[in-house]
Image (tube, grey):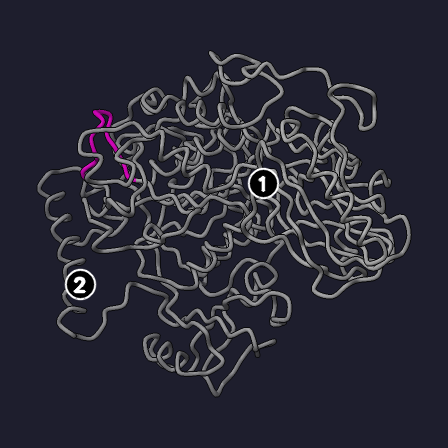
Amino acid sequence: MSCTLAAWQKCTTGSRLVRHCRSLLVLFFLYIQLSGVLGAKQVLKPHAPNRVLVRFRATVLSVEEEDRSLGLRLAHVGKSTRSYAAGGTDFSRNHVPIAYDIIDGMSVEKKVEQLKKRADVAVAEPDYEIELYKTPSDSLYQNQWHHRVVGNDKAWDVTTGSADVKVCVIDSGVDMNHPDVAGNILKGWNVVPLSDGNNYPTPGSVEWANFDDSLGHGTHVAGLVGAVSNNARGVTGGAWKVGLLPCRFITASGAGYISDAITCIRLCQEEGAHIYSNSWGGVGYSEILHDEIKKLNSENALFVVAAGNNNGLDLDRSPLYPASYKESNVLTIGSTTSTNLMSAFSNIGRNTVHLAAPGSSIYSTTNDGQYGVMSGTSMAAPIVCGAAALLKSLALEAGYDLQPAEIKSLLVETATPFQDGSKYTISGGRLNTFEAVKKLGLKIPKEADVVPGLPKNPENIPQEPNPEVGESSPDAAPQCGTTSIRGRPATQSSTYKKYVATYGNNGDCRHNARRHAKSCAITDPKRSYPWWTAPLSKQDVVTSVTITTRADCCSSSITGANIMVGNQTWDGSGDRKRFSLCGKVPSKVKRGSPIVIQCTTPLKGTNVAVYLPKKRTALSLCEVDVSLQSDANEKQTKNSDCRKTDPNNYI
């Protein structure tokens, strides 16, 4: 007997069978480790039998759909989902890995070795088959004990979530008509092969849009993240309101491959997902999958992954992926019981598993509109996703650009210690949603109420807006910035609350938007690819642009912004081709400090634009200053005057 996914239900019905299955798993992992140690032939993890993943080097601009000399033909990633996963055969804009079918009869192992020897190939590896991290149970407890244990019930007094927060559920799909899930689904996809096992759904087809769950795993996971709540029926999700993006890449038999998971990642990326729920894994190291997860970090997306159910396997010693990737946006989750102990099935790792969450006997939605209990780190991970969605929602409400690493830190730092937790996890604790929400409430600048129990105006901040620049008032803002751009009619892609574009070049040197409402221009944090622009007083040569960031928050969000100069009006990101790049904002910036971007080459123009190529990110500009060749001396004088301003006027 083997412990396949289909056999798990059988394995959990009797103690002798459980012990037998655990022994087989231990022997399986021991065999893999010893085969490498003893120098035997490398044992590959289960993978697609006739398929490889290849990423070419940047010098390769196009590929053939079929290359008989190499014995390869573009597989499903290059065909049915090309626009999402492979960018077509034109690599000039989107250099990405491609799945190839092997057509010359060579084994996967030999084909990978053959491709690795080619100068034009950067990475070649098998298309690994993933495992689902769940253990079904036949005990149906009509309650969800986990909500009270992690403090969700208290956190909901602060926020119940937002449909603007998008969570990508990469799994076996979702029961599309489940009354407790359907209302929170934004969009979904099916990338599972059709009945013949080779042809994949065509984007836009009925099959492509049919992400209905035939296994039940994905529906259980989605309900834990965000079941429709407060509707007098069924169960409650971690986030009552959330935008679910389910992607079905696991078949009814529990099989799924890395190439299909990557397709799901990119589909959700196109929709602007903030959080990714991944209750699967168990594969060897995949550089290609690793690269995809790294890219999500630049999209401000958190990748939550289950640690795995290999009966206490130490991931520090025997890494499995994606749980063992060490990235700032990866959050690996173990499982605990209702008695606050580490679940016997949960993998561990003091340097790999960040925290634990309830995963034993968890009640949630199941197929056919029903409800039931499942156990596994598969359940723990989406519970954490629900908590992350609440944090992101609270931040969006306040206009705060909460980064993936910040969400991760909040959850790790506020975890509640449990017995032997420090032996098994990085944090030594179990999820505490309320403490994380409370800590975020203390951190973010808000104009409305904050966490209950905290004063609404803890710093006695003046509630009236500060005077306009130049008004006669003891609180009049210090002025700085060149006259070539100060006061010019600035515009921006969108506006958050009252922080209009002209506040970015009104000469107000103060850089705390919370205290001084008219000192910074801010775009809507829910919108993608924001920009700000203003005309110069006349055509001139721009030598550098100085940007002052916010001191109260969000300074890191501006990293990577493009400073553009052109001779036409900037109306949107499509105008980049008509503008020239002066330079980019560096990866490290200091809050409230001027950032000088020297133009690589002095540029003649009439308009300056700041373009931020990021999704769902606010562009905050407290002052934009332009240095021109024609008035270099005048600018130097004005900057000197600005530096002499009483430092007490700066917050």
Is residue 181 left or right of 570 when viewed as pictured? left
Q: Position of residue 596 (x, y in %)?
A: 66, 51
Image coordinates for residue 378, horizontal then vertical, percent: 33, 41
- Which residue, as the protein is rendered here, is positioned at the far left? 16
The residue stretch that appears in magenta: 334-344
Q: Position of residue 168 (x, y in %)?
A: 50, 43
> Could you say whether the residue bearing mark 2 is in a helix, strand or loop?
helix
Q: Work out whether residue 548 or residue 617 is closer to the camera in this orientation and state it.
A: 548
Q: Residue furthest bottom?
A: 69
Q: Residue at x 56, y 28 (%)?
A: 162
Numbered mark located on residue 555 in the image: 1
Specify the amino acid type for callout 2.
Answer: Gln
| Residue 188 highlighted magenta (yes or no) | no
Dividing the picture into quadrants, the one containing residue 48 is bottom left
Image quadrant for the C terminus? top right
Quadrant in the picture for residue 496: top right
Point out the frontmost of discs 2 and 1. Answer: 1
Looking at the image, residue 538 lies above or below residue 641? below
Residue 207, can we see it? no
* Magenta-drawn stretch, dominant element (helix, strand or loop): loop
Using a 10 Å C-alpha cutoff, classify the residue at mark 2 as few (fewer than 14 neighbours), some (14 to 19) or many (20 or more).
some
Asked if 72 appears above or below 462 in the picture, the reply is: below
Q: On the picture, is 551 further left or further right than 280?
A: right
The amino acid type, in three-letter code, at marker 1 is Ser
Specify which label sits upstream in the sequence, 2 or 1: 2
Tell me which residue sits at (10%, 44%) in the image: 19
Q: Residue at x 62, y 20 (%)?
A: 447
Residue 33, numbered label: 2
Compute the Cα span from label 2 to label 1.
46 Å
